[in-house]
Image (spheres, grey):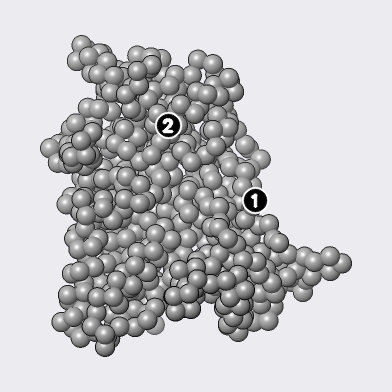
Amino acid sequence: MKKSTTIAEQLQKKYHKTEEVTNFKQMLYRSADIYRSRIAFKKKDSNKNIISITYEEFKNDIIYLGTSLIANGFTNKRIAIIGKNSYDWCVSYLAASIVGIVVPIDKELHTDDVINFMNISESSCILGDNKNLDEILKSKDKLKNKDTTFLFFDNNPNTSSISDIKQKGKELYEGGKTDFDNIEVNPDELKILLFTSGTTGNAKGVCLSQRNICSNLLSTYGIVKVKRSDLFFSVLPLHHTYECTLGFLLPIYSGASIAHCEGLRYISQNMAEFHPSVILCVPLLLEKLHTNIIKNMNKSLPEKYKKENENPFSSLPFYIKKIVKNKVKNTLGGRLRVFIVGAAAVNPIISSDFRALNLNTLQGYGLTECSPLVAGNTDFFQKDDSAGLPIPKVEYMIDNPNSEGVGEIKVKGPNVMLGYYNNVEETNKVLKDGWFYTGDLGKIDENGYLYITGRCKSVIVTKNGKNIYPEEVEYYLNDNPLISESLVLGIQKDNDDETYINAQIYPNIEAITEYLKGSVPTKEEIMKIISDVVSSVNKKLPNYKHIKGFDIRDKEFEKTTTQKIKRYGNNTKTK
């Protein structure tokens, strides 16, 4: 009897065709040649008018900046970048990574942490927003390299701006200094140095090659077709590989366009202005959009179709569904076709609801150390409760699975990092026999779909050896609209060596106010309501997973830049 093929095996026969690139310079010159006069970026000028930048202009700006960097002695040097998502950030990233080694830094970090990363990486130069560079300059005495060059994105009366530097580079280039054109990039050496901001603290330097990242963007293109007519709306921070690889380099490879969000409060306005078709996001953003859409849907529907705090769409007549679909699409800019979601698990109901509105939601799984994507839902196969299938040229396995098939996820492929910067001990812990051990727990079904069940380090082990994955309990808590966020911890009480489940809960005051028919809730009422929610969650869980105590938080949890709740520090302090 012939063995039936798995969905993962079927996927391998369906990949979109790609043209091989192994480094950023090759990708840039290829795209500028093929898409020369097409729009690479849309941005606002100083008068808030939207202007377009072609692929040829983008390439030239990188060449001019790169020429200046070479002339100033930065060949093969570490070049840091810090600032909000912008066209200048993108130009700087490619110029720096072709001329030297680029060190993207999180603009939200405390200045001392930024300086620490600059010192560890031995950065000779930093490009960035005035706001960030001004703060670093105030503490310049803490920099080991006293000759660090500061290049400001905005015009600055006291120092050179990036536009000045590009102009000088243009003059040099047009005068015959074509060193940038002659650079040969080794695709397998360290070219990108990233400091992770993972939820378990103590950031490590991740060393990536350009082949690592190019292989990842090609694999992504193989399973999610990017159209030349697409416009990517860049919301997540570019210093993170998720946005950088998939929200910046992927569209540039594909001939699509990019527009940068001006800030979270401007999302709706910017979507109406730029009319995006693709958005990379985290579940938190998707959940907020979903909540607003359901709320507005119920407000605008005739009374007989309304459903309080529920999605009424499925029970609507077909002719009203069509009107609702158009209305929702128009509120999102009119062209949106797909959300690419990462960093954490998405509620499958939300994915299903968006798909019913003709808005595809593709969830994936990745890590900085994997450039970043490992698995994803695709144009061909989708399973909303799963992180997806292995991307082309990448394989994963479960190490030492338990009776339920759950174990540590290990990954092999051309996207896996070179190692941790100057940290052989930590590198050897995670890179073994060609496999990268992710530190994440998961299982794989018979079709190859990957399911993330938690982090190795966040597993709570009870006295009788039961494993509790906090993310599972958090899922049930967060599924209730009266709770905004939660963090589940294992705590021990005095004179007792048993581990108890405690939940830190940030309530949704707006939803609780609606629940109380408009009256502002007292502390006692909030406590009673959340207590009822916890009781209802416990009924869905086996006894050993029951929440034994909870604390109400009066402010949101501290998060990483990808909006993951930090599982350390102030977030873990119980009352």
Coordinates of residue 296 in the picture (x, y in percent): 29, 71
Q: Is residue 448 visible?
A: no
Label 2, residues with CA under 10 Å away: few <14, some 14-19, many ≥20 = some
Q: Nearer the viewer, residue 550 or 227?
A: 550
Q: Which mark is residue 131?
A: 2
Residue sitting at 40 percent across and 28 percent down? 130
Q: Nearer the viewer, residue 256 or 223?
A: 256
Q: Is residue 257 visible?
A: yes
Residue sitting at 20 percent across and 11 percent down? 175
Please determine whether, in this image, residue 96 is positioned above or below residue 479. Answer: above
Task: Report how far apart the C-alphas of labels 1 and 2 lie in the structure.
Answer: 27 Å
Residue type at mark 2?
A: Lys
Q: Nearer the viewer, residue 404 or 461?
A: 461
408 vs 177, left or right, is right
- N-terminal of the pair, mark 1 or mark 2, is 2
Coordinates of residue 248 in the picture (x, y in percent): 32, 44
Label 1, residues with CA under 10 Å away: few <14, some 14-19, many ≥20 = few
Coordinates of residue 240 in the picture (x, y in percent): 44, 44
553 vs 247, left or right, is right
Q: Which mark is residue 569?
A: 1
Q: Which mark is residue 106?
A: none
Residue sitting at 54 percent across and 67 percent down? 507
108 vs 35, left or right, is right
User: Looking at the rendering, in which quadrant would you find the N terminus?
Assistant: bottom left
1 vs 2, front mark: 2
Residue found at the far front of this picture:
519
Please determine whether, in this image, residue 5 is positioned above or below residue 106. Answer: below
Residue found at the far bottom of this picture:
304
